[in-house]
Image: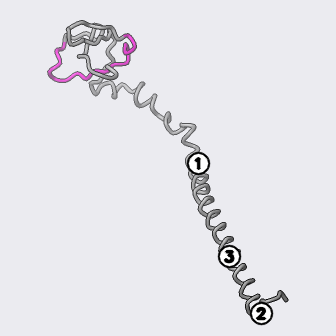
Amino acid sequence: MAEGIGRGELNSEIGHKGNQNDLANAGLRSRLFCALVPCLIFALTVLTFSPVLQNEFVNWDDIENLLENPNYRGLGWIVWAGPTFVRTPDGERIRTGGADGEVMVLRTPRTPSGISVDGPIAIDWRPGEPW
């Protein structure tokens, strides 16, 4: 037995170190748990939503319903086939060729019947993407 230390003191000293080790192990387990739970949630989320990355659900019927459906075109939206322009605040027209064939217009009851979709169309200038 160590000199100057009684049996009770030795046991309490060993027990104290044991409690510190238990606390350290509990802290380690807690940190490990706190690190693994988010990783597990992330892995389950990726696994669950990974089919979305292949976008198979997006093109199921878009072509048939939106592009080849004559009834959809009959709702009034038509593709403007003519050249596109932006009108600046000074009144100058600037060509925006990138939007040709992509602009759709809606005919309303007030739309004059003689308008040709092959003619030029212009919008007023504004910040950002014009079309």
Considering every residue shown, the one lying at the far left of the view is 110
* Marks 3 and 2, the one that precedes in the sequence: 2
For residue 23, what is the image quadrant? Answer: bottom right
Q: Measured along the vertical axis of the image, is residue 32 above or below residue 48? A: below
Label 2 vs 1, first from the N-terminus: 2
* Residue stretch in magenta: 97-113
What is the x, y in percent for residue 3? 82, 88
**Magenta stretch, overall SS:** loop
> Which mark is drawn over residue 20?
3
Task: Look at discs 3 and 1 and give the one toward the viewer.
Answer: 3
Task: Give the quadrant of the C terminus.
Answer: top left
Q: Is residue 111 left or right of residue 127?
A: left
Quarter of the rendering containing residue 11: bottom right
Rendered location of residue 92, percent (x, y): 24, 6
Q: Which residue is mark 2?
A: 6
Q: Measuring 50% from the left and 33% from the top, which residue is drawn there?
A: 59
Observer-side mark, 3 or 2, equals 2
